[in-house]
Image (tube, grey):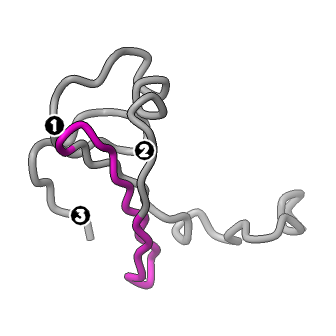
């Protein structure tokens, strides 16, 4: 038994961990989370959240990965 098996909502397989992306558009930051089954959730966070993640001010519009790395203006989701 894995030590983290008891955590509510914790996937039992790393392949089940959802992908998170941020989209900066018009000074706002939108989030998109996608699970392995293709379901998605969208949201919005303050720009300061992404700035803290990146460790610097975010000045370029486009998509950013969960670690704050710039992905481009319209990246495709990996399969």
From the top left corner, tell me how far across and down residue 25 is, in percent.
19, 45
- Mark number, residue 66: 2
Q: What percent of the width, then of the height, locates residue 41?
A: 44, 72
Region in magenta: 25-42
In the image, is residue 62 above or below residue 32? Answer: above
| SS type, badge 2 | loop
In the image, farthest residue toward the left = 73
How many tags in the picture? 3
Q: Quadrant of the C terminus?
A: bottom left
Q: Confirm or deny contact between disc 1 and disc 2 (CB under 8 A).
A: no
Cα gap from disc 3 to disc 1, whole angstroms: 18 Å
* Residue at which label 1 appears: 61
Q: Is residue 9 or residue 15 the one in the foreground?
A: 9
What residue does disc 3 label?
77
- Image point (25%, 63%), residue name: 78
User: How far from the left and from the top, in percent, is residue 67?
Assistant: 43, 36
Q: CA distance from mark 1 to mark 2?
A: 16 Å
Q: Residue at x 43, y 61 (%)?
A: 43
């Amino acid at each position: 038994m894995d030590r983290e098996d008891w955590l509510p909502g914790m996937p039992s397989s790393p392949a089940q961990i959802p992908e998170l992306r941020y989209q900066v558009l018009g000074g706002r930051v939108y989030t998109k989370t996608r699970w392995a089954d293709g379901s998605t959730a969208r949201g919005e966070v303050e720009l300061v959240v992404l700035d803290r993640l990146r460790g610097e001010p975010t000045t370029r519009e486009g998509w950013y990965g969960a670690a704050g790395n710039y992905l481009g203006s319209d990246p495709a989701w990996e399969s």
